[in-house]
């Protein structure tokens, strides 16, 4: 019975939370083992339907921003806010479904798990923000993942789509389809001088011709057209027309929408967070949220752990910025160039399953951007030595300190200097860092 399976899963959640283990993964695993159809059955209790958010980069922050907007608008949500984004994380969140009128399911979903979760939930809307090369040993080639997303979209013709017009792989999903909201950036002042080495989607999926770009904003995201078949970037209805990046302090954007225009002060830094904000705004407007609530929600949004969160440690502010693939790392590095010329860094590179065993991606990330800007750097994690070698080839100047032990290396980095310390961990290193800080009473336990 579903009722019994749900009760047992809730008991597991209660116990794991009391043990300080977060309780967002194990309860869902238990529930799905007992009732494999639990996501579909519990999802049917969401009277407001379900919205799914997926991307290679930024889905946690985009979902958090959208949740903040919906809270401002007084819209109740069931949300896997801890970032457990595979099927069991969604199942755990659904344990609370059906308790409030008009309740909306807001679920961040891993890009490889998206087809399964969407097929079970029959979502009212999908927000698909980007596709970058990431964990090829788990996801496979980028094109195959795009194909699975295309098949998913075809299976759900009534689902509204909110798509990144600037990503050719994502934009292709909405061509010839009704109920599509496009979002993007329209500020040539933020354009890169050329296509980055880490850029992924360089060729038209229709005819194979290399795209021509009028402007490139992030990785392969930009204003593009195909010289072969004429396919080009759709015009985004929701876009950031003027963008002012203010270093680690955040940014200011002029948001243009069908509902009007708004100047918004974002508390999170970097162009990648501008994309996250515009994506969240586009979905909120699709859900009927007034523009005023969109603006207030974005300006009040807080960072998720590891996504430009700041934690005081040993008298210093430690900025934690997750890095996990070339495109995401490049945007973090690009943001750090605005933070000064005497940077102190702690970088933790792991190669565990959740990170991807293949760490060769660090050679595609443009660490050369930091050449001459680094005062001190500490390398940690299971592949600390390879990270140090990469930094030497990048010509950063400072001699890397190497220590695989995360706690000891972090303490050494904190003790060596004053002012901000920028911590760049990969995914499992981020979880280990969270556990370490929780043990020291500096952060809440990891909710995984």
Image (cartoon, helix red, strand yellow):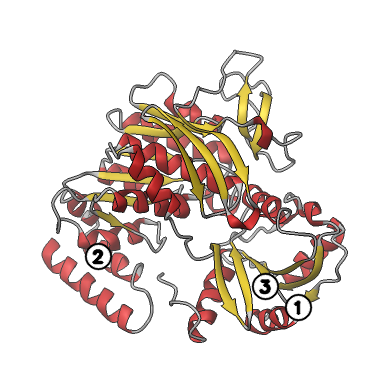
Quarter occupied by residue 243: top right
Q: Which mark is residue 417?
A: 1
Q: Of 44 and 81, which appears nearest the observer? A: 81
In the rendered view of the protein, which quadrant contains the C terminus? Answer: bottom left
**Mark sitting earlier along the chain (1/2):** 2
User: Mark 2 packing: few (<14 Cα in 10 Å), some, or many (20+)?
Assistant: many
Q: Which mark is residue 382?
A: 3
Mark 1 to mark 3: distance in Å? 25 Å
Rendered view: 424 above or below 206: below
Which element carries disc 3, helix, strand or loop? loop
Residue carrying label 2: 31
Mark 1 to mark 2: distance in Å? 48 Å
Which element carries disc 2, helix, strand or loop? helix
Q: Is residue 113 visible?
A: no
Q: Of 189 and 21, which appears nearest the observer? A: 189
Depth-wise, is mark 1 or mark 3 nearer the camera?
1
Mark 2 to mark 3: distance in Å? 33 Å
Q: Residue furthest top?
A: 229
Depth-wise, is mark 1 or mark 2 nearer the camera?
1
* Residue contact between numbered discs 2 and 3, judged by CB atoms under 8 Å: no
User: Mark 3 packing: few (<14 Cα in 10 Å), some, or many (20+)?
Assistant: some
Q: Which residue is rendered at x = 25% and y = 77% of the image?
A: 14
In the rendered view of the protein, which quadrant contains the N terminus? Answer: bottom left
Q: Which residue is rendered at x = 82% and y = 64% of the image?
A: 389
User: Residue 127: where, in percent of width, then height?
Assistant: 40, 40
**Mark sitting earlier along the chain (1/3):** 3
User: Residue 364: where, in percent of width, then height?
Assistant: 74, 49
Q: Which residue is rendered at x = 63% and y = 61% of the image?
A: 357
Which element carries disc 1, helix, strand or loop? loop
User: Residue 155: where, in percent of width, then height?
Assistant: 32, 32
């Amino acid at each position: 019975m579903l009722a019994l399976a749900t009760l047992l899963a809730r008991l597991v959640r209660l116990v794991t939370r009391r043990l300080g283990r977060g309780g967002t993964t194990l309860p869902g695993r238990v529930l799905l083992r007992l009732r494999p159809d639990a996501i579909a059955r519990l999802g049917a209790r969401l009277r407001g339907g379900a919205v799914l958010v997926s991307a290679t980069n930024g889905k946690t922050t985009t979902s958090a921003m959208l949740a903040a907007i919906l809270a401002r608008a007084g819209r109740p949500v069931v949300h896997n806010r801890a970032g457990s984004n595979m099927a069991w994380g969604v199942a755990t969140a659904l344990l609370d479904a059906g308790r409030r009128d008009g309740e909306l399911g807001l679920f961040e979903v891993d890009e490889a798990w998206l087809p399964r979760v969407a097929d079970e939930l029959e979502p009212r809307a999908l927000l698909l923000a980007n596709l970058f090369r990431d964990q090829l040993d788990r996801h496979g080639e980028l094109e195959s993942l795009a194909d699975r997303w295309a098949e998913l979209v075809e299976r759900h013709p009534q689902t509204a789509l909110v798509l990144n017009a600037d990503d050719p792989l994502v934009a292709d999903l909405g061509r010839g389809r009704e109920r599509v909201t496009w979002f993007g950036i329209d500020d040539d002042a933020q354009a890169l001088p050329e296509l980055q080495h880490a850029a992924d989607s360089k060729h038209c999926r229709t005819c194979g011709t290399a795209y021509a770009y009028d402007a490139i904003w992030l990785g392969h995201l930009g204003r593009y057209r195909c010289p072969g078949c004429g396919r080009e970037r759709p015009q985004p209805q929701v876009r950031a027309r003027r963008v002012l990046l203010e270093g680690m302090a955040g940014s200011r954007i002029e948001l243009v929408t069908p509902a009007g225009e708004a100047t918004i002060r974002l508390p999170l830094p970097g162009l990648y967070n501008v994309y996250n904000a515009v994506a969240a705004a586009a979905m909120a407007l699709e859900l009927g949220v007034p523009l005023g609530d969109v603006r207030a929600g974005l300006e009040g949004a807080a960072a998720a752990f590891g996504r430009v969160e700041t934690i005081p440690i040993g008298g210093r502010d430690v900025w934690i910025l997750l890095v996990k693939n070339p495109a995401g790392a490049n945007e973090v590095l690009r943001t750090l160039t605005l933070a000064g010329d005497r940077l102190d860094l702690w970088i933790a590179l792991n190669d565990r399953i959740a990170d991807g065993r293949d760490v060769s991606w660090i050679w595609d990330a443009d660490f050369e951007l930091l050449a001459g800007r680094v005062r001190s750097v500490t390398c940690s994690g299971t592949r600390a030595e390879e990270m140090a070698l990469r930094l030497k080839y990048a010509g950063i100047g400072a001699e890397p300190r190497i220590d695989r032990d995360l706690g000891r290396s972090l303490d050494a980095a904190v003790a060596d200097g004053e002012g901000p310390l920028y911590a760049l961990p990969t995914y499992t290193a981020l979880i280990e860092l969270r556990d370490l800080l929780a043990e020291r009473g500096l952060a809440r336990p990891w909710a995984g």
